[in-house]
Image (tube, rainbow, N blue to C red):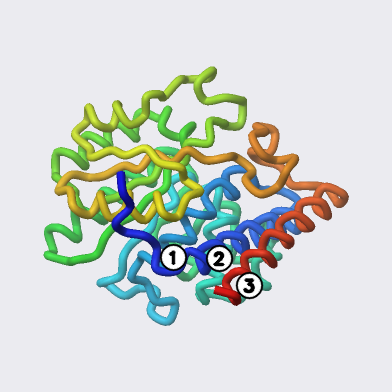
Amino acid sequence: MQNENKPKNPALLAEKAAKIRMLAVDAVYHAKSGHPGGSLSIADILAYLYFEKMNVDPKNPTDPDRDRFVLSKGHCCPALYSALAIKGYFPEEDLKTLRHLGSYLSGHPDMKHVPGIDMSTGSLGQGISAANGMALAGKRAGKNYHVYAILGDGEIQEGQVWEAAMFAAHYKLGNLTAFVDFNHLQIDGDVRDIMNPTPIDKKFEAFGWHTQVIDGHDFDAIAQAVANAEKDERPSVIVCTTVKGKGVSYMENQAGWHGKAPKDAEYEIAMHELRAAYEKAKEELCNG
């Protein structure tokens, strides 16, 4: 399919995604706990949403007409917090306080304390239900905002996700777009060995959703898929094939990096690789 909806500035998105990855790993390291693998795999999706697509304003985070975002896989908040900090919701240096006693940046998104968080999440399966409610409320109120959500591939083993899928189709929530981060790995190993959710697109299609499968690290593919979703009156799901631990050589495709922090030597390697990627992306942005 020819891409008719390329990103406005792919170099900018690449630079933002690289920075999200760098800040997320740095935050997890300073917390000495957290979830780096899935945070790294969703960085490109977050970069596209926050720095090109969504109508949001860090100076007015509760604007009733803003687009909404729900991180249903809430444990990957290091990436979301990083995107919000880069966007200007709070200082980037605060990311180093992740999971620290007294910090407002807890281990899961908290809508009461973190500017820019639209829904507190962490109990897997519940975020997409909240996104449904936001979408239905917007539709009934005649609002033009759109609701976006990211789910994990392990998360969709939860029955509540499929209740939400049925609900969204029943109420024709065309203002809802969900991304499934299909990095193939959950905390205990390959999702297909633990409780096989595939074919993910066909399951959502059976529930009445518009479905697409893309490379979740390809900005062209993300932009086109989001544009396609907007043209359909049904709720849409974009199944994004991704790499868990994307950008850090020893974390990539390793289930063991689902939920642990790098030690000192590992941190130095990770930051060397991520900083190099960031500097390269920044240089290409400047040259472009």
Q: SS class of the residue under badge 3?
A: helix
* Measured Cα–Cα span from mark 1 to mark 2: 9 Å
CA separation in Å, label 3 and label 2? 13 Å
Q: Percent x, y for residue 160?
A: 34, 33
Residue linked to disc 3:
92
Instruction: Give the residue at mark 2.
Output: 16
Give the quarter of the figure containing the N terminus: top left
Q: Earlier in the sequence, mark 3 or mark 2?
A: 2
Frontmost of labels 1 and 2 is 2
Earlier-in-chain disc, 1 versus 2: 2
Query: From mark 1 to mark 3, how far is it between C-alphas?
Result: 16 Å
| Mark 1 or mark 3, earlier in chain | 1
Name which residue lies at 45% across and 68% down. Answer: 9
Give coordinates of residue 237: x percent, y percent.
31, 42
Residue visible at 47% across and 36% down in the picture: 182
Q: Amino acid at mark 1?
A: Tyr
Label 1, secondary structure: give it. helix
In the displayed structure image, the side of residue 122 where residue 118 appears, left or right:
left
Q: Amino acid at mark 2?
A: Lys
Q: Amino acid at mark 3?
A: Glu
Q: Nearer the viewer, mark 3 or mark 2?
A: 2
Mark 1 — residue? 50
Whether 150 is drawn above or below 97: the answer is above
Count of numbered labels shown in the rendering: 3
